[in-house]
């Protein structure tokens, strides 16, 4: 028996804003969408074309406020081949929320407050 992780889900309050963020911040694009006729939810799968793993963004019609993430320390991590260029992009976007220079990593937040770790492909 073999298991393979295929996607992670994040519930989002403003789907269009979240899709734009992931496009701008991580070069992700929509690969699939599920939208029932009743409009009760929309699920969008995003990919960055460098792995088989997908990010699933779920928008729920009845959600009338941003999600409360509480003390959730959950995060996703992205490896990048040009760490300095990624850092510059994210600094210009104003989304860097924490840096750990000693470890050589930083975190950004998405529009819903989820933390996303950025790790250099090769550490010095």
Image (cartoon, rainbow, N blue to C red):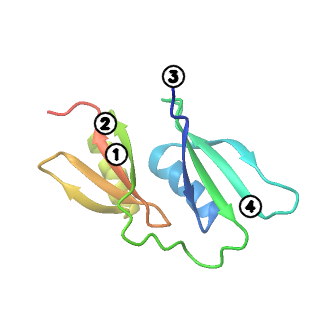
Q: CA distance from mark 4 to mark 1?
A: 32 Å
Contact between marks 2 and 1 (CB within 8 A): the answer is yes
Q: Position of residue 108 (x, y in %)?
A: 36, 58
Is there a contact, CB below 8 Å, between mark 4 and mark 2? Answer: no
Instruction: State the image coordinates of residue 73 (x, y, percent, origin top left).
Output: 35, 60
- Residue 57 in percent (x, y) is at 60, 53
Q: Secondary structure at mark 2?
A: loop
Residue bearing mark 1? 86
Which residue is denoted by mark 4 in the rendering?
A: 41
Disc 4 versus disc 2: distance between alpha carbons? Answer: 36 Å
Please name whichever residue, 17 or 100, is drawn nearer the observer in this view of the structure: 100
Q: Residue drawn at (32%, 58%), measured in percent from left and top?
A: 91
- C-alpha separation, residue under disc 2 versus residue under disc 3: 33 Å
Q: Earlier in the sequence, mark 2 or mark 3?
A: 3
Q: How many marks?
A: 4
Mark 4 / mark 2, whichever is N-terminal: 4
The residue at which mark 2 appears reads as: 82
* 10 is higher (above) or lower (below) than 53: below
Tag 1 and tag 3, C-beta contact below 8 Å: no
Residue mark closest to the camera, 1 vs 3: 3
2, above or below 23, in the image: above
Residue that carries the numbered disc 3 in the rendered image: 2
Residue furthest to the left in view is 102
Query: Quick one: SS at disc 3?
Result: loop
- Label 1 and label 3: CA atoms lie apart by 34 Å
The quadrant in which the C terminus is found is top left
* Residue that sits furthest to the front in the current view: 1
Res. 26 mark = none
Q: Answer few, some or many: residues within 10 Å of disc 3's Cα (few below 14, many 20 plus, some between 14 and 19).
A: few
From this view, report whether residue 43 is shown above or below residue 85. below
């Amino acid at each position: 028996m073999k298991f393979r992780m295929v996607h992670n889900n994040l519930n989002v309050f403003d789907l269009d804003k979240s899709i734009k963020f992931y496009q701008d911040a991580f070069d992700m694009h929509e690969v699939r969408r599920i939208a029932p006729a009743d409009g009760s939810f929309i699920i969008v799968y995003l990919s960055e074309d460098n792995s088989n793993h997908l990010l699933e963004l779920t928008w729920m019609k009845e959600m009338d406020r941003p999600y409360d993430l509480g003390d959730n320390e959950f995060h996703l991590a992205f490896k990048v081949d040009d760490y300095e260029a990624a850092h510059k992009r994210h600094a210009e976007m104003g989304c860097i929320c924490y840096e750990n220079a000693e470890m050589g990593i930083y975190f950004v937040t998405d529009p819903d407050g989820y933390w996303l770790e950025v790790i250099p492909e090769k550490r010095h």
